[in-house]
Amino acid sequence: MPKLLVPTDYVDHEVAKLRREVIEWKNQVKNELQELRCMQQGGDGNEATTAPVRVDVDELLEGADAADSAGAADSADADEDVQDTDMEEMICFDRKSAWSIPLVLSKHNFLESIFGAFLIIMNATMQVLFTVIIMSPDFLGEGLSVQDARTWRLRFAHDLDFVGLDQRNLASIVCDEDGALIFSTAQVAQLVDINNYLGLDKLSFELPNFQPGMLLAVLCILLWNICIFAELRSVWYVLRGVLLSAGASTSSLKGLSWQRISIMTLVCVGRAVVAGALLISGTIWLGNTTSITELMLNSVALEAVLHIDEFICRALVPTSLQQKIKRLPPMQVRRSRRWPSVENVLLACMLAAALLVPYMIVLAPLRATMLSVKREMCGGLVDFVITGTSGQMYTALSASAGAVTSAEVRNAELAVHEILSGEATKNGRPKYSIWEGGSFGLLVARRNQVYPDFKKEFYVCRENDRDNNLTAVLQGVGMRVGKPEAKTCEELAYFCGEEAPEWLFTMEALWLRNSCPRHCGCTQPLSSPLLKTPWFGCTRQCIQESYGFSMFGSSPLFGKPPNFTTGCKDQLPGSSWRHFWDNYLPMLDHYHGSDYFATRQAYLEFRDWAKVAGCPVIATQPQDLMGSLVCRGSSRYLPLAWFCPETCGCSASGNLERDHFCFAYDYCPMHVMPNETEQAWQLIRKYDLLRTLMNPELLFNDDAPNTAIPLAFLAAVATKAPLAPSRGALRRALRGRRRSCVVRFAEEWAEPAARTGFLAFPESFVFGVATSAYQIEGAAAEGRGPSIWDTFSTAGHAKDGATGEVACDHYHLFKEDIRLMSSLKVKAYRFSISWSRLLPNGDAAEPPSEEGLRFYSELLDALLQAGIEPWVTLYHWDLPEALHAKGGWLSKEMIVKAFGDYARICFHHFGDRVKYWITLNEPWCSAVLGYNTGDHAPGYTEETDTACYVAGHHLLLAHAEAAQIYREEFAQQGGEVGISLNADWRQADSEREEDLEAARRAMEFSLGWFAEPIYLGDYPKCMRESCGDRLPSFSASEKKKLFQSSDFFGLNSYSGNMAKAPPRPFEGTGYWEDIGVEWWHTDHQWARTDMDWPVVPWSLREILLYVQDRYKPMGGIIVTENGCACEPDISAELDERPGALLPRPWDGVRRATSSDFEDPERVRFFRAHLSAVHAAIERKAQVKGYFAWSFLDNFEWAEGYGKRFGIVRVDFQTQERTIKSSGHFLARVFEANGLEAPAKEEQYPGRTF
């Protein structure tokens, strides 16, 4: 066969062409196998597949690759032009993502298309919302703040008010990572996170090599960046595949409509934007996370947000759509052979950026901020405290910082208080002083001491050099004036003299004048009359001596003996008069500040006129520009009455006998009392008027000489004799008498006109607030056994189903409550001990609860540290349920012994800190409401004719038992034991003898039932006559134990009523029938409280005078409860909110105490009743103290939480406290030891006593 002659070039060309076709065929086979592999990998093992044949794709691909390799060498030379062509790449769509739904939706299945579109929208919405939330500043937060740490250190960390019972300041507590104190919880948590994050020790500031939080944050951020890169890469591939689908060789995607391409393009762009936003926000979020635990949780959360589309696909996409998505074929696209090299470089750059950028931008600054925050919180000297008084700052070291020098303390103080360090001095005094007088506790005591605690009155004017309190007074004053090292009066004399005008009227000057009178000008006749008044610290004896009236030495003005001839005559203006007015405006500037700026010019003109005019200025203008009476309005005007006794009415009756005296009122001057005083006493002895003074009935004896009648009254007032006739006694004595001037004077004495001016209480008067355990403590399940009130209230007997299970949660918030008391100037706090918290079963055979002992011990320590005297009630109605089951107050032997044992435990554990004990609170309520009416626990309503008398009898014996135990076993503690009895005054409705008898019976059946066995030896006679044998009797030994068993008379009184004899005797037997009185008769004009109790302030005056006159308690009277439930309308609106009166336990969040809740009716109530107490004191009632009920709104027994008595409002849902305006009013009263008498418009209407 002849050879075919073919040119070589042609042959080479054809061979190359065939080889290219073979390569293309091989590539096609490989693509088909690749597609098959994608389909197999995309399938879910739990789902059916339509492929009937299983092919080992990987084995086929490996064979094809081997064949390629074998033929590669043969074709290398001939394929040079092929090597320069682009490579082809297979792209698989997301077969597990809801984003692929648009590629498979069919217009032939309408419902499927609608649901698929809904899933796409939901997927997009969820990811967008999550992205927006994560990117929002509120979600990311502000992170750590160096300024916040600095502010905390400046304002709280070294504040003496935040020193704990262990004598550590807040900075020490926080830096020791002790979060037990509620004020330090947030800072401790922050510091623990910083130390754990940076691998630091508690007090270390050097960064270690291994920082676990930093390493974990780098890894978490890197992982997050990798996840985002994977998402972006997937989006890129899908976008390329969709855009190139028009030229695709796969028939299923060939020629996609422009609508689908547009939708998928928008989807890809949106996914890319969301991924980018998540990349930034997620990195910032992780970078700002300071807790190692939260880092891991946040990483997991971000990963979940990123893969929402996969979760929706698996959970909500129908199976048919899932199968279509999984069968989506891969796309074959061409790429440059140089792309792998570019891709490697690009990925390496992305990895480097993922590591370096977050570290430099986020993590490194975070680490620096953490270190700065810790330095701000715990850097430098930590263990010292700072407090301030009168613009003066003081620093005290703790025992652990004793080796630190004063200079170092000063530097630390200045660094911490840089806000205040702009000036080195203030008013010429150094701003910073080092306290070297002792521990933190002593610093607290000196700072908190108040003038009434140390004010002394002596019968001779002398320095208090023998007073044990003098050192404390001088040290406390020294603190306040910047001289804590001062030890003597000489060193501090400058601060109470007239050469220091900025100190003239301050509390420090008052202390010094009282303690150092001779160094402070109290005895100098030419010193300021204004400053010599008791209002500003000088005692009356020193004032009398300065003006020449001294029974113990020479007069600096008149020699010895004093020789007075002026009588009660006005004096002409002199140097002393002008001296008074020179100090008048500075005094107003000090007390009123800018409050009277608008009228200051008028005061200035008034002052200038008064200096020249003399006494007539008082006659023409008896009130100052603020409405205070000049002669009698306030003790600060006392010198004006000394200068002008005639104008001020000290001798103006026209009666010769009366004009022998220059007294009339307390403000009149003793230093001009004439020598006829001795003559007056001769008359008193001549007519035996001392006996008359003690018995007002004798004042109107027809046999008494006419001259004796006025002298009896006048001498009584002048000599402060105990003339305090009751209204009833005077009215009976005056009945039928001729209305002479003497009778009118007596009537005025019996019913004084409206009180005006400042009402000052005795210096030793005790002001306080009161609560009880069950009403405020809560924490019923924390170591406390059930009481009768738990059983009674949980059975639904209290309004709205209320119980004391939570109440005010005082058990957990007592430190904050004590801090509130301090801010309200409270000097004494009366509270009760829960019997069942100490003895859960009530039985002393078992040891007392450690939890209960610890709680009350910490409470007492905190009170004493705050300068608040505890008054402790042993029983305030919450009898342990276990004892009630044994008979309760009806079982004599059991209950008396149990109460004595319980009292002994309290005396033993707490008696070193408690000096005032109250055995029982209102035994009348326990007996009558608990064992007669059933209104109170235990709700006993059987044997109503005897049960209450038996219970009351045993209550009295229990009181006597406790009092005897204290006096015999714990007398060395030096305390007092008393009882609190409740009663409201019952006034006779008329002058009829029957009504007078009804009022007497009402008082004896209520107050006398429990008071007379203690003070008079047995039950009232009328009770024995009415009850007979139903009223138990005392044995001789029991009477002896009961008699005078109370060191003071505690009185709880809230209201008053009229008593009236019934038109006919009551039928039957029982407590109310035995009294035989119309008990609740009232005047319809009387105001009423939310409890529907009449508001009758003068009833408090009358019952105090009644107690003093009838029982004459040796230890005086303490008003242990007085208050009202009288909330404004806004309170009722707040309480109508759902759940407002269902207390919840405190949630651990400290809330700022608010102080803007107005309760004007309670302010009016307190002002009126305190004025009534003052009136009783003026009439010689020995009232020694007053406790306002109540400190907090609380569980008001059967009334639940709707009746609010507190001066501090409690939001029972959050346990937030809000100081009411009545609280601020009482704070002013407590601080000033007195109040302005109520104005006429403030006084209550209705019938007066």
Image (cartoon, rainbow, N blue to C red):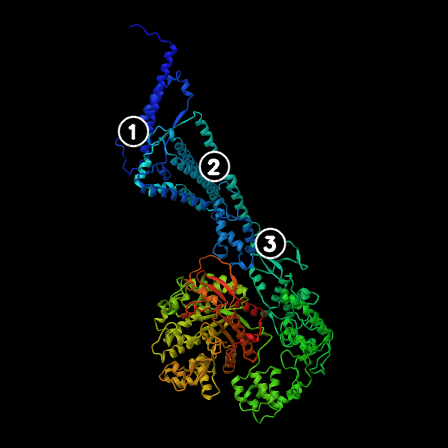
Quadrant of the snapshot with the N terminus: top left
443 to 334, vertically: above or below:
below
15 to 498, vertically: above or below:
above
Extreme-top residue of the structure: 2
State the image coordinates of residue 1110 (x, y, percent, origin top left): 50, 83
Closer to us: 661 or 55? 55
Question: Does residue 302 appear anywhere in the picture?
Answer: yes
Whole-number angstrom distance, CA of label 1 to CA of label 3: 79 Å
Q: Earlier in the sequence, mark 1 or mark 3?
A: 1
Q: Quadrant of residue 720?
A: bottom right
Q: Secondary structure at mark 2?
A: helix
Q: Secondary structure at mark 1?
A: loop
User: Crowding near pointer 3: few (<14 within 10 Å), some, many (20+)?
Assistant: some
Amino acid type, mark 1? Asp
State the image coordinates of residue 445 (x, y, percent, origin top left): 57, 64
The residue that label 1 is drawn on is 56
Residue at screen point 51% across, 54% down? 173
Q: Earlier in the sequence, mark 1 or mark 2?
A: 1
Asked whether, in this view, residue 349 is left or right of residue 524, the answer is left
Amino acid type, mark 2? Ala
Whole-number angstrom distance, CA of label 1 to CA of label 2: 39 Å
State the image coordinates of residue 881 (x, y, percent, origin top left): 37, 69
Extreme-bottom residue of the structure: 703
Amino acid type, mark 3? His
- For the image, the number of numbered tags is 3
Closer to us: 444 or 1108? 1108
The residue that label 2 is drawn on is 354
Q: Are marks 1 and 2 in contact (CB under 8 Å)?
A: no
Q: Which mark is residue 417?
A: 3
Whole-number angstrom distance, CA of label 2 to CA of label 3: 43 Å
